Image: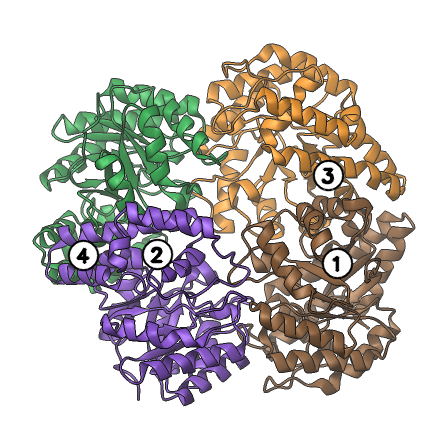
Chain colours: A brown, B purple, C green, D orange
Amino acid sequence: MPNGFRLKGLVPATFTPMKEDGQIDLTKIPAIVDRLQGHGAGGLFVCGTTGEGASLSMAERMLTLEAHVGAADRRLPVIAHVAHTSLVEARELAAHAQRAGAAAISALPPFYFKPATLEQLVASMAEIASAAPELPFYYYHIPGFTGVSLDLVEFLRQAADRIPNLAGVKYTAPTLYEFQSCAAVLDGRFDLVFGVDEMLLAGLATGAQGAVGSTYNLAPRLYQAVMTHALAGNLAEARRLQLLSAHMVEAVKRYRPLPALKAMMAFIGHDCGPTRLPLQAMSATEKLALHRELDDIGFLEWMA
Amino acid sequence: MPNGFRLKGLVPATFTPMKEDGQIDLTKIPAIVDRLQGHGAGGLFVCGTTGEGASLSMAERMLTLEAHVGAADRRLPVIAHVAHTSLVEARELAAHAQRAGAAAISALPPFYFKPATLEQLVASMAEIASAAPELPFYYYHIPGFTGVSLDLVEFLRQAADRIPNLAGVKYTAPTLYEFQSCAAVLDGRFDLVFGVDEMLLAGLATGAQGAVGSTYNLAPRLYQAVMTHALAGNLAEARRLQLLSAHMVEAVKRYRPLPALKAMMAFIGHDCGPTRLPLQAMSATEKLALHRELDDIGFLEWMA
Amino acid sequence: MPNGFRLKGLVPATFTPMKEDGQIDLTKIPAIVDRLQGHGAGGLFVCGTTGEGASLSMAERMLTLEAHVGAADRRLPVIAHVAHTSLVEARELAAHAQRAGAAAISALPPFYFKPATLEQLVASMAEIASAAPELPFYYYHIPGFTGVSLDLVEFLRQAADRIPNLAGVKYTAPTLYEFQSCAAVLDGRFDLVFGVDEMLLAGLATGAQGAVGSTYNLAPRLYQAVMTHALAGNLAEARRLQLLSAHMVEAVKRYRPLPALKAMMAFIGHDCGPTRLPLQAMSATEKLALHRELDDIGFLEWMA
Amino acid sequence: MPNGFRLKGLVPATFTPMKEDGQIDLTKIPAIVDRLQGHGAGGLFVCGTTGEGASLSMAERMLTLEAHVGAADRRLPVIAHVAHTSLVEARELAAHAQRAGAAAISALPPFYFKPATLEQLVASMAEIASAAPELPFYYYHIPGFTGVSLDLVEFLRQAADRIPNLAGVKYTAPTLYEFQSCAAVLDGRFDLVFGVDEMLLAGLATGAQGAVGSTYNLAPRLYQAVMTHALAGNLAEARRLQLLSAHMVEAVKRYRPLPALKAMMAFIGHDCGPTRLPLQAMSATEKLALHRELDDIGFLEWMA
């Protein structure tokens, strides 16, 4: 019975390393995982948005997960993102994750056909979660990508009885009042993990204890410092550091967020290659300009 | 060289028959195809939105296509919808379609990550189309589902050189001025097929020669009558018949469009079973009420 | 009792002439109205979207209406657009329109706070319509601007008893199946006027008898030819002419639709000045380029 | 030269009191203002979203502002919201606010026609701000209502030279990373005031020193306690209290937010009457049920 499972601290949503021709490159994963583990990562979130899960084939998703589980070697929990527009495929990914040794699974809702009612959402998620019954299940709320923004508080209340392994929510939206309400449902039964890196301080103030995000790959020391200062009630210093994250987002969005973030992995010696179409990878010129901007705003030094 | 390929007349977007437990049921396909062929269908569009393609596994999509190609037995062209959020999987579906004997392929753009520029859209579509180089390729424009609504006229101009087998567009949007502009690009080089059944008359008036849609499964005689009257310039009678389609849509949307339409297949003796989650299938009570409404508005008699 | 009022033919939505400094310039109105009357306009729609009604002060809206009513001099009906985010102001505009001699009023729904239910929509529209009880009232459906897209068929059914002077709908959306359903409500009691110029042919085919739009100011002969050919069942020729309208829209949207259309009034000798902020008026260079494009596509000759 | 003006603490966005027939009722304002002043309000934001400014006539907006300025009697600053779809009217409201003794003005962007570029936004806002040159001007960012969400950091940089009296931003959106970036523009030159009550703690953690909102009318002691604990670094207690606000929002949105909040004024002895159409006022039954819910969650006691 997986309830009670909690993610703590910073959980990088890992990039899926690729070769220049777009093939996945599993050989890069062990070194990346070692680095993240050395930085005290609270887990690894694999094949999610950052990992371009939606752009990978079924086989690639399974191989990528296995490579992370192998590299983690029980040193830190690996959460497998298993969503798919087809619940049949999602169930297969879920079952594979359980077999492969993932510590938990997570799924966003179907997003071609979209659940229009809570009943449809609960039923859809129950179907996925039941394919990995021994693993905690995290609902992945990311309305900016899925267009699904049903009442989450009510979802948790209704799903509590229908999805026995429902452990919590990966909450990737800025609406922290809803985050806080969800965390309070059924006396705090569910684990609410915050997914907006550039608002980490706000999330911590609102009660987040775990956070999943792409930039925790890049500047783990920075965000850990934010966390330390926030927990000590030293908000001024936490804010000063969090501002670097906001500035980084300003820079990154001048290019294209995910391609830019993936390109930044090369800046720290872990080249993860280009993003796949439909995302347009960064050009060499763009990378150079971005590097300079990150240096100017003082973010680069935290990536060391 | 597949250019010059044109779809003519009414092309039903087929439902994927399922058993009560949600498994696909290929045994139903031959009778459905025979009926549609008997009604003069101009082709079959398989595993698209109507066919719940996004809710099927890769294997199910391939089997469903093969069953339709087999049942069609060269009597009418089968167009395979091969889109996927992963271009790797989409290419595999495209290559399979070519091997399996499809007459053409079609794909909507990636819709988790979405192309944000024409360059990203052209490059993404080129990648899919090149995996079935011997087949005509139809871009599937359906912004209500994908959220992608880049300038289609410009897309066609730019794609003309980059996608050698680009044959046309399955245009599922009500904006007929754009439809007409697209049809005029490069002296009418591309085949624009209209995808809004309940606006068929408007589409025909604007120049559509082919139309793909779900309700052409259900009431082919009605829409053929619309077509005949429209082509003869008898707009008043065409309009009277087209109004039945508009009334049907009013009824259907009081329930849930796709589940209702799929349920209606049973009304004509070709039970296609329930829709899959996240779409909620019709209950027996709902089916009964819908049947009565369709009778009241005079649509049911056209389904005979 | 104003029911039974019908708008016929092409009804230009007039531009509000302005001086270079942005002040309204009523002196230009008589010549414009004479020209439109000479071209057989079916009425004038004043202070709507084309007329930048939302950018005018209350006083300016009243003056602009009076100038049009005066210039029309009973030769053709003037419809006053009286919507406002404040129903108090909308009622004042409606009452003024009745006093000033308008033939009908029209209003879109409040759009800062928006009606979220049919009851709120009906009640809001009833409040406006009752301030001009002797005039026919047209609900102005333009969801692309207002964000309000409640079920129109149901609206008409419910409003029929609640708004005694409800005459019809100015329907500015491409979804012609809904247009057709609305026209059929209560045995065709309501007058459905179509508002998408670049889809006029499709609208006519679907049954529109009147059409309101901005480009009927610019090329009335073109659209009348479309109308004549369509009514004669000569769809091929109607289509050929309608394509010019679609090409014009392609050109205009490369700039900014309303500023471009307003600038085009100068091309026919009726300079209406710039658009007001927040719309950015066309520069001289842009106007020159647009003029050339309109010439190239063959639209300009129809503006003579 | 108004730069350097800062709003501090909790600034209630006041409701506009109305009689049962919907007429404004200025007689209620003095007692409300006295109460808020007694609770240490940092100012009053008048005729904004909470005050149904968009539903009031020009005359009503001016009278409502004057009543608040009179009641405040220099004890606390009054900020006048002067936005209008017509910049002509907005300028008139701005000039009136300066004459009437407001301490600052604020405006959201035009929202029928919307600025599509930063240049259009800056030019539009400059036009309003220049009509009250002696007052600080706050740009009112509320994309959920206006649909305008241009890059705010860049807006502030460009507007700094073009709008001499630009003092800051009333920021009503949950995206606190952008809030933080804006607060850092030009070495913190601008005053960023936070407008999401149910996220006050997150806003404070991110650096907000002032906050404008509707519920500061209702439970000022609660939010002041949140503020006190947050500033003291006592995040756990601040969070416990902030959760009451989140629960209140859950209750309120089960009805309709603004009508419910306005109805709640009667619960504290300051009946502000119904909301105007298109907002549907609360029924007596709904009010009773809401009162009970607010009691159950422990919010009501903080309204005393």
Chain ID at mark 4: C
- In the image, is B2 to the left or to the right of D157? left
Judging by the rendered image, the residue that carries numbered circle 3 is D246
Amino acid, disc 3: Ala
Question: Label 4: which residue?
Answer: C300
Q: Residue at x 51, y 58 (%)?
A: B279
Asked whether the viewer can see residue D15, the reply is no
Cα distance in 3D space between marks 3 and 1: 27 Å
Q: CA distance from mark 2 to mark 1?
A: 53 Å
Q: Position of residue B37 (x, y in %)?
A: 26, 74
4 and 2 marks on the same chain = yes
The tag earlier along the polypeptide, 4 or 2, is 2
| Residue A164 tag number | 1
What's the CA distance linking mark 1 and mark 4? Answer: 68 Å
Q: Nearer the viewer, mark 4 or mark 2?
A: 2
**Image depth: mark 4 or mark 3 in front:** 3
